[in-house]
Amino acid sequence: MNGHKLGVIGGSGLYDLDELVDVERCQVDTPFGEPSGKYICGNLGEQELVFLPRHGEGHTLLPSEVNYRANIHGFRQLGVRHILSVSAVGSLREDVHPGEMVVPDQLFDRTRLRPNTFFGQGVVAHVSFGDPFCPQLRATLLEVLRELNLSHHDGGTYVCMEGPCFSTRAESEFYRSMGASVIGMTNLPEAKLAREAEICYATLALSTDYDCWHQSEEAVSVEAVLAVVRQNSAAARRVVAGLASRFRPQAGCKCQSALANAIMTDLGRIPMATRQRLALLLESYLGDS
């Protein structure tokens, strides 16, 4: 064991990791409510891994109903500082075919109904988010994809929409005109919260369809998406296993000190209830204040 836990968030089609051994289902109570379910803690080869199906057991949570704050905080409570998000997406580019994988390097936020920060209620923090994905974790993920010889794309913008409906054709064409690569419903505020929690975060986006912009294709349907999701899940498991075997975090990643210059509030003025709620995230910065 290398002493570092790897977290994996499973998206549509990836609800478990049967390859894990010494499995324990971990119930975690967080200051932000209940996570999507119990975390599945175990070992994958020599790597300690913590897995959580984002939409809950049996896929019972809409993208807007996922308690992203509880999910991310729960990972941090379990000692996870690196998370791979596995997410089903629609393709906005002709060259990103259904069944292929994308490792995005940018995000565009179109959500509007979701709590998207741990802060407030007496404490203000503004983390840097210009590069929303961890460069070190992305680099390792790309190495794994090359080694496995899986068709993938390095970089691109992930548009995160509110859902649960898929896009209109007008919306899809608008996102394409922006130069975006894929569209999904779950990576925000997930990635923002991971940065606030000083957790390295990267996404393996699994293309399931051409959204609805592709005139030669039928408008996206759940049936069509699920057919490709099932094909993608086996490849995603191979990638997770490959990442687990190569996972060797490097010291000094800026993701893990994101709050160092982000807290604007006079520490002595943070209300006690807020200090207690954020104790895990702020313990390195509060000191004796």
Image (cartoon, rainbow, N blue to C red):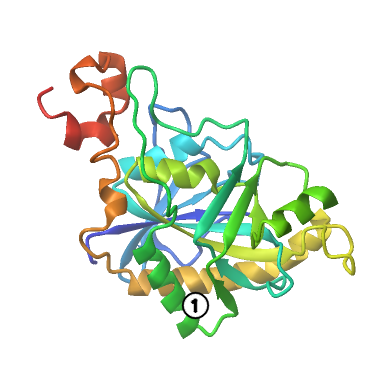
* Direction from residue 224 to residue 98 in the image, left or right: left
Identify which residue is drawn at 38% across, 58% down. Answer: 134
Give SS at disc 1.
Answer: helix
Q: Quadrant of residue 192?
A: top left
- Image location of residue 267, percent across then percent down: 20, 22
- Where residue 210 sits in the image (x, y, percent)? 77, 64
The residue that label 1 is drawn on is 145
* Image coords of residue 152 (percent x, y): 58, 76
Which quadrant of the rendered structure holds the C terminus?
Answer: top left
- Describe residue 261's horizontal placement relative to residue 188 as left or right: left
Amino acid bearing label 1: Leu
Give the total number of marks visible in the rendering.
1
In the rendered image, the quadrant that contains the N terminus is bottom left
For mark 1, does the 10 Å Cα neighbourhood hold few (<14), some (14 to 19), or many (20 or more) residues?
many
Q: Is residue 218 above or below residue 73?
A: below
Can the viewer see residue 23 in this picture?
no
Q: Give the residue at the far front of this rendering.
A: 177
> Residue drawn 72% across and 58% down?
177
Of 216 and 175, the residue lying toward us: 175
- Relative side of 78 to 93, left or right: left
Residue 264 visible somewhere in the drawing: yes
Q: Position of residue 229 (x, y in %)?
A: 69, 64
Q: Residue at x 43, y 56 (%)?
A: 133
| Vertical side of 187 occupied by 14: above or below | below
In the foreground, 96 or 225: 96
Q: Which residue is located at x 44 percent, y 77 percent?
A: 144
